[in-house]
Amino acid sequence: MPVTVEQSGGMRFIRLEGEVNIASASELKKLLLEALAADGEVRVDLERAAELDVTAWQLLWAGEREARACGKGFSVAGQVPEEVLLSMGEAGWNTFPVSGEAKAEEK
Amino acid sequence: MAQENNIDKYKQTFLEEAREILIELESALLALNENRGDLELVGRAFRALHTIKGSGAMFGFDQLAGFSHNLENAFDEVRNGRLAVSSELINLSLSAFDQIKAMLDEAAGGEPASSVVAAEILTKLREVTGKGERPAEAVAPPAVVPAAPAGTVRRWQVRFSPGADFMRHGANPLLLLRELRQLGSLEIKASLAAIPPISELDPERCYISWDMVLSTASTRAAMRDVFIFVEDICELVIEPAAELVAKPVVAEAAATAPKGAEKKFPPWGRRASDTPDNASSIRVPAAKLDQFVDLVGELVTVQARLVEIATRHDDADVVAVSEEIERLTTALRENSISIRMLPVRSTFERFRRLVHDLARDLHKEVELTIEGTDTELDKSVIDQLNDPLMHLIRNSMDHGIEPAAGRLAAGKRSSATIHLSARHSGASVLICVADDGGGINAAAVRARAIEKGLVAAEAQLSESEVFALILAPGFSTAQTITDVSGRGVGMDVVRRSVEGLRGTIDIASKPGMGTTVTLRLPLTLAIIDGLLVRVGQAYFVLPLASTLECIELTRQDIDRANGKHVANVRGEIIPYIRLREYFRLRSEPPEREQIMVAETESGRYGFVVDEVLGDHQTVIKNLGRFYRHVDLVSGATILGNGTVALILDPHRLVREAIRTMTVGRRPLSTRTAHIRADARASPPSHDGAAGDGAGAEGPLLSSTEKFAGTAGAVQ
């Protein structure tokens, strides 16, 4: 499963692995909604993601916006792989999770 | 896992579409061969390849995409005037086309395509493009890296908004953007304004749209080509940006005029192609259509029952409703049949390749002209048309058309023509394959037929009867006479296929002028208008299209005819077949019988029945494998009361009757004309194998009598 969730120390880690595309979009949305509804911070782990498609981008972005609106912690855990950043850059995507602080935020 | 199924479904759709695009590609290549300067055709080939490449990559057919990419590049070179269209390129492209087809077959679960062949083709392709036969009139300066093509760089504003179903089609906007980037330098900004709150977000929909400024020397058409596969599921606006980067535009090699504002295509609209007629259509699996027609067939059957019940109850309301339903059913039936109608275009176009390849192999110059491609035929008929047409064309090319030297000697153009045409004629469609070759040597055919025992030496045959002999199974063997050698090869296949479609074949030929084979095919195989008749307890349906009139046959008439099975209809002598005797039905004939007069291939014939019940919308049901070889019956139908009625084929019934009467005694040639002559002249009766007391009576009587006698033997 390219999208999994893990609860650890009051934080919810949503882990994206390998190719994350339309096939796992519904699952990702479900997990994001659950994480947003639950207590505690949400961390998105993209370290092992090889490729994200636009369905994943927009879900992550919408999740981050939602979290920001209700003052909830929502951030990227670990490094975003170069190829993911590259493809986002190529497509003119210069917001979450490409943003500077996301890249800087190391574990 | 629904998504996975969906992806599979899209892959399936891709494979189907790719096959259609391949047909387009092939016809473009072949047309290009005839008309090498036509940039429109180059563009067609390029777009077809581009689409196959793009969508192939989208669905993970990387090998296919890679292979097509190479060919696409070659055509891009042609498009930009850097490479001339040569026979070599065309032939290579056609082999590449075959390879792509093989790859598609592989993707569909067929045999694996040979990678050796693919590599070979690519090597040769590189040679051809590398060698660079540069035409003198080439406009674009050569030798430029494709990423930054020469010419004037212009800035374009591009707005790309994927439609709601974009992702669900398996399309990936990122790949398209990447491809667009290759045309020049791209400034890009993703617009996220449309992304809704996460709870309302449809995870499978792309809400992002892109605003871009592309600086490129490519044409607007080239930019559009990037989006060609998705143009009906996205919104695309390409406009020149305000300022120009470099000097004014010079004539571009393949510049198609900007088509005004790019329009938005309706969702699910088909790929916008050169033909307007598929502008808005939907793709439905043939099986669903068959099911639909089957259901309409069932409805027709039930409706017939309703009519019967309504008549029995004699209730005005029920009758009114049943009549209304009858009207609707008829409309629905006609509608369902029209849905299955397809133009013969793609079937016809396919033969350009055959003609091209065969002409090359046989070292003959042959041009295929096509007419009436819009003529529509039932899908099931079209599906079965391929084989017979292929054999006919092959025969024409191989044996009908003379070598160029022979043609010149005969005072003809060295280049021969095969004309393939289709047109409507009543409830049938006429399909003609005409060549301007040497024609059929009638005397040779006749001699061979006599030698093979197909006709008697003294038989008087009309020309078309002689030509019909080449369709006989005996003629389809290899050791035929040299003059017409092979004219029979495959002709048996043609005959069988056409008869399977309830069609007929007519052959006309003039020595030295050419041969025309005309196939007459029914418009549909599913439902026909029939005439329901009864003989004793048995019901039969005769196709309404072939019945002419219905006359009464009284005992008196029978007596007057001196036992001969002929009726005098307004002075015309019409032979008839008594179905009761023919099918050996054990029941007493009524005092007054009816003769259904039908027009058959063998002339007018009557069929004697007890009662004519009226016209009947006949849903043709297959009789199944066991009865497949029963030629006289073309199927069965279920009547309102649940009884099964056999659908008779008057042509075959008469032909079979003549055959059984003549078999073993008289060759095939004794046709109606002969029988009539016999009837008049009353020659000595034939001593027959099937005795039935034929000797004592006139030949016509004996013949019809024997129909009854041998009917059981007719399989």
Image (cartoon, rainbow, N blue to C red):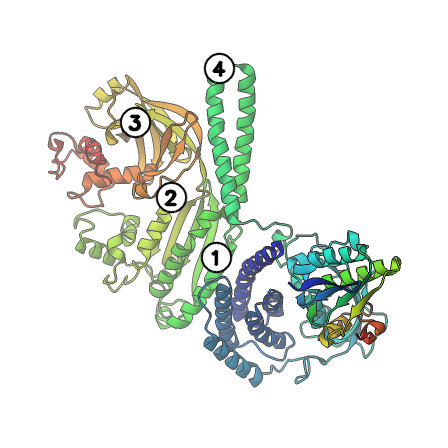
Horizontal and vertical percent position of residue B525: 43, 42
Q: Residue B562 appears in which quarter of the rendering?
A: top left
Residue with the mark numbered 2: B502
Q: Is residue B686 left or right of residue B612?
A: left
Q: Which comes before the other along the chain, label 3 or label 2? A: 2
Subunit bearing disc 4: B
The structure residue drawn at horizontal position 49% and vertical position 31%, both measured from the top left corner, is B300
Residue that mark 1 sits on: B348
B204 up-or-down from B696: above or below: below
Distance of label 4 from label 1 (alpha carbons): 53 Å
> Which residue is drawn at the image coordinates 66% and 62% (left, top)?
B171
B77 or B13: nearer the eye?
A: B13
Q: Tell me which chain the residue with mark 3 is part of.
A: B
User: Tag 2, which chain?
Assistant: B
Q: In the picture provided, is B619 more to the left or to the right than B699?
A: right
Place of residue B305 in the rendered image (x, y in percent of width and height, measured from the top left): 46, 25
Q: Residues within 10 Å of mark 3 (few under 14, many from 20)?
A: many
Residues at badges 3 and 2 in contact (C-beta under 8 Å)? no
Secondary structure, mark 4, is: helix
Mark 4 vs mark 1, foreground winner is 4
Give whichever of B283, B335 is nearer the camera: B283
Mark 1 or mark 4, which is nearer the start of the sequence?
A: 4
